[in-house]
Image (cartoon, helix red, strand yellow):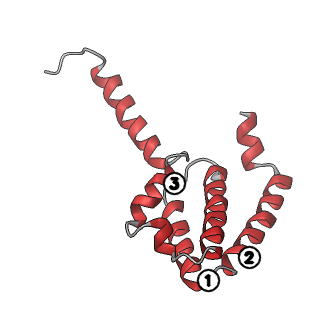
Amino acid sequence: MSEFFDNYFNIKKIIESKREYKRQMARVEALPKDYCYVFKKIQSHMWMFAAGSGYDMIKIHYDLITLFEEGAAEGKRVLEITGEDVAAFCDELLKSAQIYTENWRGKLNRDILKKVGKGGDSQ
């Protein structure tokens, strides 16, 4: 329960998180246009899957900014970093985050096991 309050009702943490987010987004705006566009599309896509407080998703975004900054500094095109299947790239990024689909999968399995049970009769 304490973790819940730390993440959702800690005003100091919320304010600092907003400040940090604004600093990070300024870094995104400094990227070349194609990098900025791709980052924002990825960010928008990934937030659809965020679960819980979303702090793990923010960490992924910050790491992505760093990756994009390094790629831009090396003169790489953005798709050299993400590959042409940007959705698959997002899937890889999401593997380290708590996402809603995990909740849906868990609920499906719990509901079925509760009703049918392990080794239960399927008739």
Rendered position, 113 above or below 58: above
Q: Secondary structure at mark 3?
A: helix
The residue positioned farthest toward the left in the image shown: 123
Q: For marks 1 and 3, give the one nearer the viewer.
A: 1
Q: Position of residue 118 (x, y in %)?
A: 30, 17
Calculate the distance from the C-alpha at mark 1 to the C-alpha at mark 3: 21 Å
Checking the image for residue 65, the label placed there is none
The amino acid sitting under disc 3 is Leu
The residue positioned farthest toward the front in the image shown: 74
Tell me the residue at 60%/47% (across/down): 52
Q: Which residue is at the front of the view, 39 or 113?
A: 39
The residue beneath circle 3 is 93
The residue beneath circle 2 is 26
The amino acid sitting under disc 2 is Ala
The residue beneath circle 1 is 32
The residue positioned farthest toward the right in the image shown: 12
